[in-house]
Amino acid sequence: MKKKLAMLLMMAVMLSAVACGKDAPANAESEAPAAEEEETPAEESGGTDETGKEQEGGELPAPESFKIAYIDAAPGDSSQQAMYDGAKTVVEAAGGEMIMVESGHDADALVTGVEDAISAGADGIMFTPPADSVLPTVTKLCEEAEVYFAITFRSIQDEQVKEIVEASPYYAGNTYEQEYDGGYYVTELLAKSGVKQLAFISLNKGDNTADAREAGMKKACEENNIEIIGELRAPAQPSVATEALESWIATYPDLDGFALVSCQTAGVFEAVATTIETNGKAGQIKFGSCDFSNDMVSGFESGVLTALCGGHAIADRTFCAVILTNAVMGTPLSDGPSSILVPFLYVDKAEDAQAYQDYMLGGTPFYTEEECRELLLGYYHEGLDLEQVQKTASDFSIEDVKTRHSN
C-alpha cells in the first residue's frame, strides 16, 4: 500500500510541474535551466519511455518495484510454461517481479499458497479457486495483509460469495471463458462426425469450469441423440484414464466418441489419444477435447482427433496478470473489479494445430514486453481502460499472434 502511495505521489508531482510551466522543475535533482527548455519546440519537449512512446513533460519515472505471486502447480509442459511466461512478461514489462508459489488444486492447498505468497512479500496474488466456498477465506487474508488478488479461469457463481469478494477493495477482478460454449462446440462437432455413443472425463462435480462445460456437452448430446455411456472424474494418473477407456471399449463395441471435458492431471490427453490408437480405434472413436495438448498435431494427422477448443489458458493467465498489475500500480482498468472474457481458440485440422504450436508455444511470449506496455499497462498508456483491454483480449487468436510476430 505504501509503495503504491509513493508511486502515485511521484506521478502527481510530475504532473503538477508540467501544469505550472516548464520553468518549474519537478524536483531539485531534475532541475534544468529554463532558457534551454524554452528553446525546445513544443512538439519536441516530450521525452520517451522505454517503449519509445512520447510522454508529455518528459520521461516517465521508472515504476517502483512490486511482486506478483502466481499460485499453481509447477509448469510441467510447454503449454503450462507458456501460461506462466505470458503472465511473467506482463509483470516484468511493468517493472515488477513474478514469484512462483507452488500449490495443489484443493481449497486447503490454495489457502496455504495465499499465506505463503503473503509471507513472501507479494503485492498481488493470482490464482484459480477450486470452488467459490474458499473465496471468503482468501478475501479475508488479502484484506488483512493489504494485498490485491485476482481470479483466473473463473466467474463467481455463488451470489453471497460474490457480494463478499466484490466488496473488498483488494479484489482486482477475474478472467473467464464461456465454458458452456466450449463444451457445446466440441460435442456438436463430434455429433457432425457421426458420434452416437460418448464417454467423457471431467473434474469432480462442483468445479465451476467443468460443470459449465458438461452442461454444454450434455445439451449437444440431447439435441443430437448421443448416448452417454460412461464418465470418469478427476483421474489422479494418466494410467487411470487408460484403464477406464479400455474398459469402455471392451464393454461397448459401438463406442464411437470420447470427450475430455476438463482435467488437471498432466498426460491424460496423451493417454487417451494413445489408447484409441493402440486399440485400433483411430477414426472410429472420435476424440474431442476442451483443452489443447502438445500432441494435437500428430493427433489430427493420425485421425485420432476430431475437434478441440482451448488455447485460452495462456491468454487467461496473461490478462489476469494485466488486471492485477494495473491495480497494484495504481492504474486500475475500472472503478471496481475488472472482468475480462477470454475467447476460446477452435482447431479442427493439423495445419491450425501446427500454427498454434509455432506461434503460441514457440518460446516467444505472444505479447512482448513492448506490446504489453503499449496495449495492456495503464502506467505507460494514459487513459487505458477495461473496454480497450477487453477488445485486445477479444482479438486474441492464432492469426492475431501470427500477424504480429511473423516478422
Image: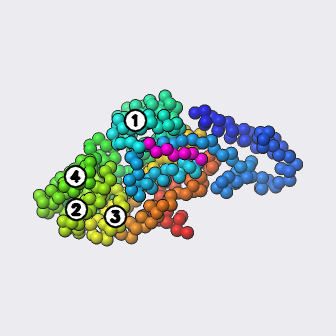
SS state under label 2: helix
Q: Earlier in the sequence, mark 4 or mark 2?
A: 4
361 to the left or right of 18: left
Q: Which mark is residue 122?
A: none
Instruction: Point out residue 198 in the picture as x, y percentages from the top left corner.
Output: 20, 57
Q: Mark 2 = which residue? A: 275
The magenta stretch spans which residues?
95-101
Image height of 313 relative to 8, above or below: below
Q: Earlier in the sequence, mark 4 or mark 1?
A: 1
Q: Earlier in the sequence, mark 2 or mark 1?
A: 1
User: How far apart are labels 3 and 2 at the CA level?
Assistant: 15 Å
216 to the left or right of 325: left
Residue 272, by quadrant, is: bottom left
Judge the density around disc 4: few (<14), some (14-19), many (≥20) Cα neighbours within 10 Å. Answer: some
Instruction: Point out residue 204 in the picture as x, y percentages from the top left corner.
Output: 26, 44
Residue type marked 3? Met
Residue type marked 4? Val
Image height of 62 relative to 163, above or below: below
Q: Earlier in the sequence, mark 3 or mark 2?
A: 2
Q: Mark 1 = which residue? A: 112
Q: Residue at x 54, y 45 (%)?
A: 97
User: How far apart are labels 4 and 1 at the CA level?
Assistant: 28 Å
Q: Mark 3 = which residue? A: 296
SS state under label 1: helix
Instruction: Point out residue 283 in the picture as x, y percentages from the top left corner.
Output: 23, 69
